[in-house]
Amino acid sequence: MLEALKGIASGMKTTLSMLKEPRDTYPYPEKRRELAPRYRGKHMLAVDEDGHELCVGCGLCEAVCPAHAIRVVAAGAEGDRTVSWTERYAVDYEVDLIRCIFCGMCEEACPTNAVRLTPFNELAAYDRRDMIAKKDELLAPPVRR
Amino acid sequence: MKTLDRHYLLRHRDVPGIDTLQGYEADGGYSGLKKALAEFEPDAIVDLVKASGLRGRGGAGFPTGLKWSFLAKDGRPRALVVNADEGEPGTFKDRELIEHNPHQLIEGMLIASYATRSPESFIYIRGEFLHGHEVLQRAIAEATERGYLGDRVLGTDFSHHMYLYRGAGAYICGEESALLESLEGRRGNPRLKPPFPAVAGVYGLPTVVNNVETIANLPPLILNGAEWHRQWGTEKSPGLKVMSVSGHVTRPGNYEVPLDATLRELVEMAGGVRTGHQVKAVIPGGSSMPLLPAGQLDTPIDYESLVQAGSMLGSGGCIVMDDSTCIVAAVARVVRFYRDESCGKCTPCREGTYWMTDVLDRLEGGQGELGDLDTLLDVADNINGKAFCPLGDASVGFMVSAIRNFRDEFVEHITGRTCPLGARLYDTVNY
Amino acid sequence: MVVDAAATVGIDIPVYCYHQALGPLGACRICLVEIEKMPKLMTACTTAATDGMVVHTQSQAAEKGRRGILEFLLINHPLDCPICDKGGECFLQDYVFQYGAGQARFEEAKIQRHKEYPVSPYILVDQERCVLCQRCVRFMGEYVGEEELLMDGRGVHTVITNVPGIPLTSPFSGNVIDLCPVGALLSEPYHYRARPWNIEREDTYCSQCPVGCSSSVTGRDGQVVRLEGRPTPGQWGWLCDHGRFTYDFGAHPTRLTEARLDGEPVTVGRAAQVLGQRLAAVVREHGPDAVAVLTGGSHTVEDHYALRRFADEVLGGSRAGLVKPVEADLPLALLGTFAELDQSDTVLLLGTDPYESAPVVHLALRENVRRRGLVVKALGDRHLLRDTLAGEEWVVEPGGMAAALAAATAGVSEHPDARLAAEGLAPADESLVRLGQALMEPGALTVLWDGREQDLAPALVALARARGEHPTRVLPTFGPRNWLAAARVGIPTDYETSRRILMDAADGRIQVLLLWGADPVRDFPDGDLAARALERCPEVYFGGVFPPDGAELLAGVLPTAAWAEEAGTYVNMEGRLQTGRGAASAPGQARPTRNILQAVARAYGTPLRKLDEWDPYEGTVDDRLVLPPLEGSVRPVSPPPAAESGFRLISGLEVALTHDPSEVAARTKEDRPARMHPADLADLGLLTGSGPVELSSGDRSFRVGVRGDPRIPRGRVFVPRGLRGVPINRLGGIAVAVRAVEEVASR
């Protein structure tokens, strides 16, 4: 009996001592974790000041992606309607955010600095298909509130 | 230097009216051809030329008789091509020979054709030599009328036809294989060797390509013999040479001198530099050749001595620069010439000259960096000996020798951010 | 050359301008090596390797030279690899990566030039990326002999371009895309389509003519997006543009992608089931002779094997035949090879212009003429030689080639067969004797023949026998692409068998006719008979890729997978088996023939077993069909038809027009397929040198666009065979009336 009480007391001691420690959990979403500035979250496709996409659809990100999460389909600009800053642009650009391991190799491989990983990490959806980020979605980078 | 009693190549200086057939014949013209046809077997002429030690006057200085004996002996008809595409900056000797003494060239060609058993010969004349072209046309017509050209020359079994072809203005067509391409009507790019022209030249025939001055040497050589020729110059470089002296001298022009004259003698013949100025540097053989600074003025102009001094005789275009010359501007100008005249066939010459021109323009404009000099030398090293034809090597010779001898002047341009002599390039715009 | 010698021992020396087919040039200087006892660095591509030569490819001097050249090549290069189609398969990238300096020193302005400049509907030039290796210029000018690309400008401003305002028209121009070592010459249809790491690139053989050029097919997202030449030992890997740019035929709008029964779309399984049950009922009632199979010779050997076993085992011995666009049968014993062509002393073009019927063979002939002085003779009903292929030619009356050949042989040879073949013919005149002498020259003779004139077969056999021990070989330039696959699996390939089948169908003796890729109304030389057969036969089923003429008469249609959609073996015109792999997926309901036939057989009640265990290569020698010995007697050649008044119709095969429907290749497709002498056109009032005409014979007529061609003799009109909408096989007879018609207002 005494042994048992002793055991409980020792256990409670550890527990109570932890109450003094700072908290590791956050009351999400009221309070959000402060992330490092180079935190790798959801991708974005950058646009220059004239509104031209930086992405030229070269497909290097697709080639380098270890998770095969990226799909790029390129095309030439028709007539004067240039989408990117050069003749070639990406018609389709998809990132499968379920497959993605956020390693940042795409960002590193990009020769035009078009693909960037934003610190946005609130990735959740009701449907798996919604987790495939399309090009227009990537062109409008999400802002973390 | 042994002084000349008379001119042998620039005969028109002594004999007025020699540019017509009458005038030429009156001065004993075509007697060399008559003697050759009457007294010599073709091979005997080749031996005579070999014995005389005559070397090609176009630039490389290859022994002429030896060149002739390399012709393929397989029964195909042969051809003689005379390279009158005198484009080397600073050289204008062939032009004077053609315009004022055309019959000596024609006579020499007939002798060379007889010696090489060529039924046909071609003169590829520089496109800009319009007057020379007209003179030659007239001279060939005169010679044909008199029976020196055509079937059965002077009643002998030797028949010969001569064709005159005007180039279209490319410097590279002075290179023999590019000349042959152009002569055949194609883009003037140098050909791959082998096969050498002696095996497959113009229209695939065994071909000798000789310079105008080389050929003009033949008539007096036939008349006077090998020993006469050997009395001038040195053992290895015998004979006479027409030197074109230009630049900062008071009497620029062509001077016929024995091959053991020194550069200083040449400059003095041309009246020396302007009063109050000193010779700064001399290019002895046209802009393709490295320069020699004033300290080396006592170098004789024979082939061997100039090579030993670090330059070459080349085509004999002696450019004299006095101390008012900005060497950087001169180099930039010369390299620009080679950029413009590169045919575009091979990478080092095509791209390297473009690169050097840009850097040199920047240097002359005071925008250079100290590292640029090493870059220039390394680029030059990557061109030198690696280009398809000699034009690549030619484009760097002057620049490398200039940086080597006048490095301080280059550094002054860089550190002073301007040209100390105030020289200006007339065109510094890249296009 | 040193570079070749190094390659044989596995040492890679980088090259741009050097190509073995084009010879040394020495322009790019990238192959600089150090050779002992030579004062300066030498180019490995222009220096002949000699005994005892010591070459250093990795010495300090050689590496510096190479690095310097690469630096030069890059100073005016735009470095736009991310948007370059060649990126990832570019020799400039590879060599700079392997040998180049890590850092650029060039800081000045780069020269700007044309980018994406179209020199033809298929080819773009990017002059900024060009390294001026001149491969393209030399290929077009020297190898092909059509100087359509040239170097413009001097020095650093030199660019590759076309003659201003004149796009490339040569059928070999596409090869410059393959030849270009960098991204300067680009394929317009492939522009920006894919990158080397997201494609499937498989070895295959071109599907458009019986030459069977080795090639690589590129597939992306299940579609074929490119075809490239693939060099193999002994072959340079050239393609003609007709083959190269027809790769997209599998995605053509007219492609069959759904099964149909009586015009109603059904699933392919349902169609197979109905067909199996119908066949079972017919065979039960009328016997196997009431069913016949005709193949069009476009499916693979494996498919033909399944087809033959289907006819033999399932149907119980029904007849099978081949529909081909020519009436003559090649004596298979004489079938030659390209290697034999390269060894031949004389080549005879017999009625065929290989430039039109088998373009890459034209290149092979030209190379042989240039390299070793091959002698070319031509016998035909029109001028067969051209500027780029010189020789001597004999132009005879239409239908008179066989008689001329037999007479020429008999005029020189005493051989009894030569005599027999020429029996009843007029003796050879002086000109034909000269032909006979040329053909009887000792040494090897190769005949290129397009299979017209049935009597040429005995005439060729007589010639071969008269030549005795000197080899005589025939290369058939007629299609269909894979007709020798039928020979491989034992389906009769002769004209008579298929004619009998069609006659029986036309006479109502056949209840079910199964056409497998066959389009008899369009292709069969007797088009009327084929049309009657389709009309009279109660049930005609069709399996294939494109609907045949008379599709409205079909009882059922089964879409099959096409070339590049499945691996399969083809047999080319030399009888060589070639296995190509698939790089795309069959669209819609299209299925491989084998699967469809299996399904039909199961519905029939007699499943085909162990189809996949058969090896097409089994029993072949050097991957080639085993040829039968040359036996049988020679029959006399009939005299040429008497000259008639009016125009005479002549024909031939032209792969430029008869290739599969393709949207890419349609860019340059000629819409005036017929040809006449310009003077004849002027006589017809067509002063512009072309226009629509009406050809008529008896009560038959059709309209066709015609253009001027001085190589067609006066009084003749040339119309290619097997062309959709140009039914010359239904005109009958060779005398036609030609009338210019007003252009129908359209377009």
Image: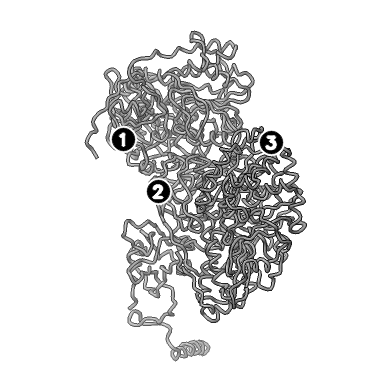
2 or 3: mark nearer the eye: 3
Q: Quadrant of residue C126?
A: bottom left
- Dot 2, how many residues are within 10 Å of its Cα: few (below 14), some (14-19), or many (20+)? few
Reading the chain from its start, which is encountered first: label 1 or label 2? Answer: 2
Q: Is residue B263 left or right of residue B236?
A: left
Q: CA distance from mark 1 to mark 2?
A: 51 Å
Residue situated furthest left in the rendering: C745
Residue that appears at 54% across and 55% down: B171
3 or 1: mark nearer the eye: 3
Same-subunit check for callouts 2 and 3: no
Question: Where in the figure is residue C73, as x and y percent of width and height?
Answer: 54, 60
Q: Is residue C272 left or right of residue C570?
A: left
Q: Secondary structure at mark 1?
A: strand
Q: Chain of mark 2?
A: C
Same-subunit check for callouts 1 and 2: yes
C206, A14: nearer the viewer: C206
Question: Where in the figure is residue C293, as x and y percent of width and height?
Answer: 41, 25
Question: What numbered label is drawn on residue C260?
Answer: 1
* Residue that carries the numbered disc 2 in the rendered image: C164
Same-subunit check for callouts 3 and 1: no
* Residue that carries the numbered disc 3 in the rendered image: B74
Is C115 drawn above or below residue B46 in the view shown? below
Q: Is residue B383 visible?
A: no
Is C464 drawn above or below residue B114 in the view shown? above
Q: Secondary structure at mark 3?
A: loop
Label count reads: 3
The three-letter code of the residue at mark 3 reads Asp
Residue that appears at 67% across and 62% down: B312
The three-letter code of the residue at mark 1 reads Arg
Is A35 drawn above or below residue B43 in the view shown? below
